[in-house]
Amino acid sequence: MEISMEKIQSLTKPTNTHQGERDVIGAKKIGGEIGNNRRALSVINQNLDNRGGVKRPGDHPQFCVASKRTLSQKLAAEIDNKKQCFQEEAKKTNELDEGFGVWEEQDENQPVPMFLEPSDPMVDEGDHDMEEVEMEDSFEESVIDIDVCDEGNHLAVVEYVQDLYANYRRMENFSLVSSDYMTQQCDLNEKMRAILIDWLIEVHHKFDLQPETLFLTVNLIDRFLAKQSVIRKNLQLVGLVAMLLACKYEEVSVPIIDDLIFISDKAYSRSQILEMEKLMLNTLEFNMSLPTPYVFMKRFLKAAQSESKLDQLSFFLVELCLVEYEMLKFPPSLLAAASVYTAQCSLYGLKLWSKTCEWHTNYSEDQLLECSRMIVGYHQKAGVGRLTGVYRKYNTTKFGYAAKCEPAKFLIEETNMFLENNNS
């Protein structure tokens, strides 16, 4: 099933937040000075006002929005009542003073009424620490609007891009196949599937087809094999026809049937390809419009604010997953999110999953770890063995030698240490 490089090269290449602010109620003096020893009521008001900035247990800022701390209605009403009482008492005192025409001298030792005696403010390091914590909480990481830069781009469909991906998430369940469908095949096994996908990745690269064509090809193969029993000698024919259908769906210029016959070393005739094409379409009920990991990859990379290196490494990792049969247990969106997360870990050497990524992928870091660790394992052995099509593809200048990037081994090492600690 190997490709003749001279034959492939001889083919004609197809044409292709606002941050939170703390509301502070300014203290106001109420009434005039009542006696020489009468204390200012503004101190009391200020103490009451300061209660509005205290963080209470259970208060949490809204997700991805800077929190504001304001006085509750109950506390505000209480302060207003206090102020009104103080104003009335001050007014009565002034009326008495005006009636007698003299100010009564008060003894310095005479105690001040409790309701006028302000509490001594206790300032210690703990208060400063609480203020610092409150300031840190008020500047939480916010979700970035990743579509604001495309508002003038009509092809980006900013107005309903969120609805599109919500629909993709609903529809991806229909593209899933059982992760043990190979048990229903009498003459095939997982290794044969891996050889076929690895070979198709090389064919796809040599024909310089669109990336979405490859993902749709693999999706058609798995969905077809999950419903139709195939003998071993026709497995390559299934792969060729799946790629032909994917090209008709995604490409502008489609490879002709003679090209497919040529790259298969004339193992199949034109009539066999056409018969398999009809069988595959009828088996799949002509349903070609299902989301693959590719559509999620584009969105999630945008959420990660990626650059060229992250793009290439992410696609390298997700294509490694296409070859592996056991990765069928993960939905396309999870596979895409885990590939982006693993690529970030590989490039930057640390776990990096922002609130923006979590918001747009709907996956937390913990939900990605299982899939991500499996991807790291595939990354480690990508250049060894017989199935090295993906590695050789991404070990070129065109893809920035992404295959040479060091795997994020620390993700696996953390798991091993955790298991060792639990066993001990």
Image (spheres, rainbow, N blue to C red):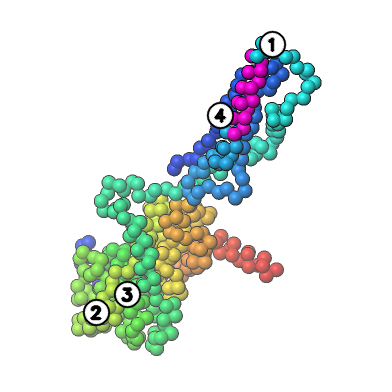
Q: Is residue 228 left or right of residue 130?
A: left
Q: Magenta region, mostly helix, strand or loop?
A: helix
Which of pointers 4 and 2 lies earlier in the amino acid sequence? 4
Q: Position of residue 37 (x, y in %)?
A: 71, 18
SS at mark 1? loop
Crowdedness near tag 2: few (<14), some (14–19) or many (≥20) residues, C-alpha within 10 Å: some
Pick the front one: 91 or 164: 91
Q: Position of residue 183 (x, y in %)?
A: 43, 85
User: CA–CA distance between discs 4 and 3?
Assistant: 68 Å
Q: Quadrant of residue 180?
A: bottom left
Amino acid carrying mark 3 in the image: Leu
Which of pointers 4 and 1 lies earlier in the amino acid sequence? 4
Which of pointers 2 and 3 lies earlier in the amino acid sequence? 3
Q: Which residue is mark 1?
A: 102
Amino acid carrying mark 4 in the image: Gly
Q: Which residue is mark 2?
A: 277
Residue drawn at the location 61% of the way across and 40% of the way down: 54
Residue drawn at the location 34% of the way across and 58% of the way down: 163
